[in-house]
Amino acid sequence: MNISRELLDELVGHVAEDPRNELCGVVAVADDGSPPGSRRAVSVHRAGNLHASPLRFEIEPIELYRLNSEIEDGGCELGAIYHSHVRSDPYPSQTDINYAAGWPGVEWVIVGLAGAEPLTRSYLIEDGRVREIPLEIS
């Protein structure tokens, strides 16, 4: 996914608002046509963490459905689900991997807040396999 510095800063700024609990949201993308299939982030949408927990996140299904509908109504698609890890590196936990099973093809952007500076990584999680995907910052 290609994401502007401004949108990435918005995403990181959101999850940094509460360094004690995982915060989350989604990223809308549009096909930018170059190269074919390349996707460009167009907006960041905050969501509530159903668990308000430092150890896990889950977006309430009705909220996720509403966000997805709004994104599609705007001519885009849900390209990424993001959240923070407040106590660990930005690598998918087993809980993240299990949650991702319902969202094939969607990137998982994780912001690690355990270090001195936020560290952001993106992954595709398919069939229980985790593959890091570079975030292209423009």
Image (cartoon, rainbow, N blue to C red):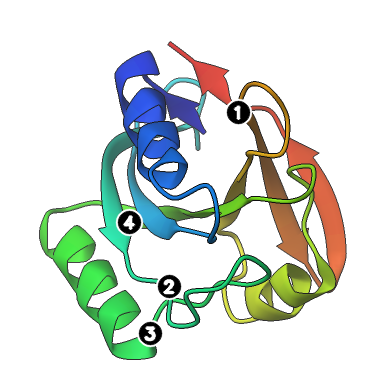
Mark 4 or mark 2, which is nearer to you?
2
Q: Quadrant of residue 119?
A: top right
For image coordinates 43% across by 82% down, the residue present is 50
The residue that mark 1 highlights is 118
Distance between the Cα atoms at labels 4 and 1? 26 Å
Distance between the Cα atoms at labels 3 and 4? 19 Å
Mark 4 or mark 1, which is nearer to you?
1
Give amino acid for label 3.
Answer: Glu
For image coordinates 53% across by 54% down, the residue present is 83
Give amino acid for label 1.
Answer: Pro
The numbered mark, 3 or 1, whose residue comes first in the sequence reads 3
The numbered mark, 4 or 1, whose residue comes first in the sequence reads 4
Element under disc 4: strand
Distance between the Cα atoms at labels 3 and 2? 7 Å
Viewer-proximal residue, 81 or 133?
A: 81
The residue that mark 3 highlights is 60
Q: Residue 58 shows which numbered tag?
A: none
Residue 115 relative to residue 18: left or right: right
Q: Residue 77 shows which numbered tag?
A: 4
For image coordinates 75% across by 76% down, the residue present is 95
Element under disc 2: loop
Distance between the Cα atoms at labels 2 and 1? 19 Å
Mark 3 or mark 2, which is nearer to you?
2
Element under disc 3: loop
For image coordinates 76% across by 71% down, the residue present is 97
Residue 33 in view (yes/no): no
Residue 60 relative to residue 76: left or right: right
Find out whether the residues at labels 3 and 1 contact each other: C-beta distance under 8 Å. no
Distance between the Cα atoms at labels 4 and 2? 21 Å
Find out whether the residues at labels 4 and 1 contact each other: C-beta distance under 8 Å. no
Element under disc 1: loop
